[in-house]
């Protein structure tokens, strides 16, 4: 087999050439007006009927012949006879033949003999809506390539239009490929990879106005991929293959597209998203997307959205931009453009942004991202505190009212987030899992509103306060208790290694899994070691770090570790056993400015709320006895 | 019957109190993940499974035990035996038990006996995606009250979630009322009013995330309206009655809501939209909307959209704002807030905005509007050339590339608009029907890019040039021929009055319908009068003005006039007869700056294009023999 190398074509260049060479052929279809909301007209629409269809009264009152009223005046009222000189008329009613003006009901005096008296003349055509005042037959109501909005439907109906010619939605085939890939809802076996990419790709296509179909999964066999693409090319306007787009031994997408048509590009100089294939076959665009989810979605947005938008005659929607201060340094390699997912929050009069993981396999980074930092190919990245412009995934107004929680993560923080939204739907809470020390540092640098911390100081036997004093000696902050929670050994179900205390880890040579430096749990474990007069070197796996309780428990559940230190809910999530060790204090550290805000009041209301506390304690391993208690710092 | 008066409650005050007193009760439902795009979660969603579900390779290569590779170096390569010291592994493949690192395929040397050689040690867990790296079981994937986006679906599927609890769409009943109202697609009789409002109201509700249903039309009878509302209150979360919301004799909406529940407000101090009723019954919001379309849609947006958004926990979307220069004075009454629909275009480095008709019955004003000028209650309005802020209906980028055509309107201008979009989908063309003189003035004031004009000067027997010289003596402009077209008498089918020339209008005392002052057709008619030595006073209906050829033809078709002067396509639109009189020259006046632009090149390409010219001439009454010819000014 011939060796394939990926090119490093700049993204914009690849897009420009792709759009020049590939096109979705336009088709139109007739749809009923009531089904046409959001559809794009394929030609201009002209009115068939006029609205109003007759001269109509614009008021409740009487229809008159203006010429006969010219003598009426204050001094000399004029009497009009019913059905001869005037007719009653309601708003919208047709002007009777021979009549040419309307007098408002307020301006007439009804007499006993059913005649009326007026004290001012009517001018011809006053209070009359002329035929066609709203829409006149023959007039263009809607231009071609216009996305239909609610009032457009009204004008079309007014003009007698009940069916419109619209652009047919481009049909897009999504072909999932991979011998290890299974449908996303099937039971997962070790080694099988559920295909959730196709659902996401289809959802994007739907949002952009295409009509996606996810075809059956094709194994990594060139003939089967070829056959699937050939079939798709017959029925669809556009074919997307996911994945096999790289240059590995089992990546056949390139060869198949090249055989059936033409590959314009294989590889773009952007990360994530590099192993993208842009080509065509049978005059239809064919795209090979990378397998890693973030890469696939980014690449889809770069290359497929513009194709679909151009088909529909719509501009590619632009994201709102925002100037932000970088909370951390973000480095990048020269020669490669990089798209970095960022969290953003408004703290102390500025927008602070921090990078999320860059792993192309981490879908959650897209879920959590508030925006996107694009680092140009010629840049080495940006320094901490530098001001950069990012593209927003959420409206700025939402980000503005987003509370940033940093520090140690606990399930209660998520519950607080839900409770906040329940009370004020325009607020939200985002948490970064930085560990307790990271949380104190974030409050110190004004990068978060609150931080969860649980740091035991062996010297003073006190929680949190000694660390705050040391790390933030000059900063005015507030400390508030959130909960007391149990830390303990997380071990496989049934505790097969019969762990009781820290000595068992060494004696039984168990594979331990640790938490990252700076986390409260790490501090606690080091303290337990010290108390037992043991050294880290004696613990097998001491260097292996996980960043959350849940990830630690996952490693134990997967059997790659035998024990770790953590909290009860993490053990429960994986149906593991939990050997309680220590009850620790978990506090919230707040900046003084935030402590005084309306949002902090809301936070206090929530954590001191009886039903909220019951909910937390119901999880097991928590005591809310001091929740909301302010602790002197 | 008791007399009802509308109150003048300020809009914001009415909204605040309405939102305090009325609420759509929240309901949730379970939907399949594939149906959940755009839906709003009703509770936080936690992962059921981890992704990856096992320790997986992040690379194509071999799995090894890191501890066994520590001796490998450049000088001293290490040999690993297949299936003992290493196993082949692909990206995503599960790490075999006992192995804890992956070496990339590029970094190994395959030997003949199927063993491999490495020249660098592996560190433990290198190139391994730990279980739960993307999503870890127990983790919160999506918070409560979050509108689901494509990547969210991926993360949920990755976490083993195939169904989600979402807020049920609030069910909204739309009750059309009015004895004269008929379904929009039924054949129209004189005096019947097609109900297109319900379709528009339902479309808005759908866009905002509600589930609308249009109920049968109810006549203006209080018992029937009451019965319809009672039935709707049983099945729906929110009831909208359109119309009968004012204080007229047949307006029963107020009385019905008051009887069944409570009316909070009847009448808001805003135009259009004043006769709005806000109330509740059976703890469900009940809204009475005005009958005039623009009033109804504005009121719906002010009061119903915030209710629906609050139900869904979403902010009310804000429109983009833009600073514009007013092309005309906009006056307003003190004490009433006014919403004025505006057209906007970017001409000569600034955004120029002009008001559209304020008629609440003109749906087309909403179709044509680019934005909305809100005049506060305490303001008398704004002066010409004043800078004001408006809310945009279309993105600023679209408005920026919008060509503004002013002056006399002709169907060809609409055809040019379509052709422009065909060639560059991001461009568009909007035309204001100002008449020829209005067009020259608009070019003079830099309020338009081009203007269609056809003004005959009797003194010089020349078209257009004398008027431009007089009206714009110092301005550098360009004149380009578009077409020659026939003007003639528009008369009922069969020409019952046997009109041949202008004298017939007087001799036969026919009801004439005129065009507005400043229009080319009015100038032509005045010239014909002068030539025939007649005076305006002799023409019956000389004062009655219509603003377009089509509206003039509509009046003739409706029988309120017997004859008017106009062009063939207008007569054809109403199946009227056309008696040709004069072939006139119709030119395009361009500012010099626009003449030199890329957009003007596109315009020239279009009007000199053979197939475009055939299309125009095929309409009848047009000759394109000089289209694109530049005329000295």
Image (cartoon, coloured by chain):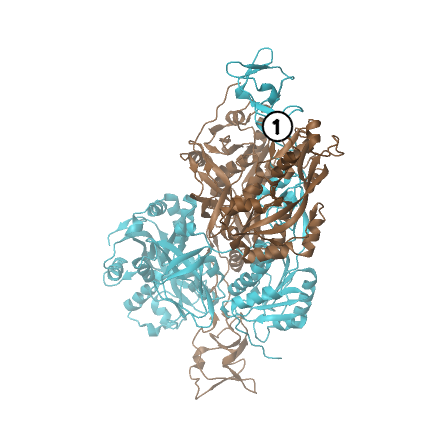
Chain colours: A cyan, B brown
> Residue A441, position in %: x, y?
31, 61
Q: Quadrant of residue B541?
A: top right
On the image, numbered disc 1 is attached to which residue? Answer: B537
Give the residue furthest to the right: B494
Give the residue furthest to the front: B459
Residue B167 visible somewhere in the drawing: no
Residue B153 visible somewhere in the drawing: yes
> Residue A305, position in %: x, y?
56, 59
Q: Residue at x 42, y 32 (%)?
A: B334
Q: Quadrant of residue B194?
A: top right
> Residue B135, position in %: x, y?
48, 61
When the figure is inspected, residue B527 is found, relative to residue A126, above or below; the finding is below
- A600 with respect to B198 (left or right): left
When the figure is inspected, residue B414 is found, relative to residue A105, above or below; the finding is below
Residue at mark 1: chain: B
- Closest to the observer, B135 or A248: A248
Q: Residue at x 65, y 69 (%)?
A: A225
- Closest to the observer, B484 or A216: B484
- Closest to the observer, B428 or A186: B428
């Amino acid at each position: 087999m011939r060796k394939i190398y990926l090119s490093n074509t700049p993204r914009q260049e690849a897009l420009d050439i792709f759009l020049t060479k590939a096109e979705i052929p336009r088709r139109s279809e007739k749809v009923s007006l009531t089904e046409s909301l959001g559809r794009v007209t394929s030609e201009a629409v002209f009115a068939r009927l006029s609205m109003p269809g007759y001269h109509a009264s614009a008021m409740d009152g009487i229809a008159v012949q203006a010429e006969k009223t010219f003598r009426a005046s204050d001094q000399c009222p004029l009497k009009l006879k019913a059905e001869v000189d005037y007719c009653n008329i309601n708003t919208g009613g047709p002007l009777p033949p021979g009549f040419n003006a309307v007098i408002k009901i307020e301006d007439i005096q009804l007499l006993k003999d059913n005649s009326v008296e007026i004290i001012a003349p009517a001018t011809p055509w006053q209070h009359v809506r002329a035929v066609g005042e709203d829409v006149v037959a023959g007039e263009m109501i809607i231009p071609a390539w216009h996305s239909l909005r609610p009032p457009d439907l009204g004008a079309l109906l007014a003009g007698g239009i009940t069916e419109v010619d619209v652009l047919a939605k481009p049909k897009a085939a999504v072909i999932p490929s991979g011998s290890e890939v299974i449908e996303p809802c099937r039971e997962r076996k070790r080694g099988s990879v559920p295909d959730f990419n196709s659902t996401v790709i289809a959802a994007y296509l739907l949002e952009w106005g295409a009509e996606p179909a996810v075809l059956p999964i094709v194994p990594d066999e060139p003939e089967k991929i070829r056959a699937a693409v050939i079939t798709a090319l017959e029925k669809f306007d556009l074919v997307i293959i996911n994945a096999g787009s790289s240059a590995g031994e089992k990546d056949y997408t390139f060869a198949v597209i090249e055989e059936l048509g033409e590959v314009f590009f294989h590889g773009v100089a952007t990360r994530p998203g590099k192993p993208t294939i842009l080509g065509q076959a049978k005059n239809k665009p064919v795209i090979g997307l990378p397998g890693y989810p973030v890469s696939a979605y980014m690449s889809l947005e770069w290359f497929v959205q513009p194709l679909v938008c151009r088909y529909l005659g719509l501009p590619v929607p632009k994201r709102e931009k925002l100037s932000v201060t970088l909370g951390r340094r973000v480095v990048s390699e020269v020669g490669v453009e990089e798209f970095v997912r960022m969290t953003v929050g408004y703290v102390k009069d500025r927008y602070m942004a921090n990078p999320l993981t860059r792993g192309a396999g981490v879908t959650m980074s897209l879920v959590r991202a508030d925006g996107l930092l694009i680092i140009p190919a010629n840049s080495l990245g940006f320094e901490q505190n530098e001001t950069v412009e990012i593209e927003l995934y959420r409206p700025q107004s939402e980000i503005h009212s987003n509370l940033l929680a940093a520090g140690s993560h606990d399930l209660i923080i998520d519950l607080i987030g839900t409770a906040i939204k329940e009370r004020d739907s325009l607020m939200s809470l985002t948490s970064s899992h930085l560990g307790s020390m990271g949380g104190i540092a974030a409050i110190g640098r004004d990068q978060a509103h609150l931080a969860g911390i649980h740091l035991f100081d062996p010297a003073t036997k006190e929680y949190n306060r000694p660390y705050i004093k040391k790390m933030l000696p000059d900063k005015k902050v507030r400390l508030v208790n959130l909960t007391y929670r149990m830390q303990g050994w997380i071990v496989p179900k049934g505790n097969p290694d019969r762990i009781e205390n820290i000595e068992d880890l060494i004696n039984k040579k168990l594979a331990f899994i640790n938490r990252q430096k700076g986390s409260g749990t790490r501090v606690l474990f080091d303290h337990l070691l010290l108390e037992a007069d043991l050294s880290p070197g004696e613990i097998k796996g001491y260097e292996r770090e996980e960043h959350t309780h849940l990830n630690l428990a996952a490693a134990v559940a997967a059997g790659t570790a035998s024990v770790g230190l953590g909290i009860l809910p993490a053990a429960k999530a994986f149906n593991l056993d939990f050997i309680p060790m220590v009850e620790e204090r978990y506090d919230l550290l707040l900046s003084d400015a935030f402590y005084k805000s309306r949002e902090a009041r809301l936070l206090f209301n929530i954590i001191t709320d009886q039903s909220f506390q019951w909910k937390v304690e119901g999880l097991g391993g928590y005591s809310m006895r001091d929740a909301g208690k302010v602790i002197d710092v």
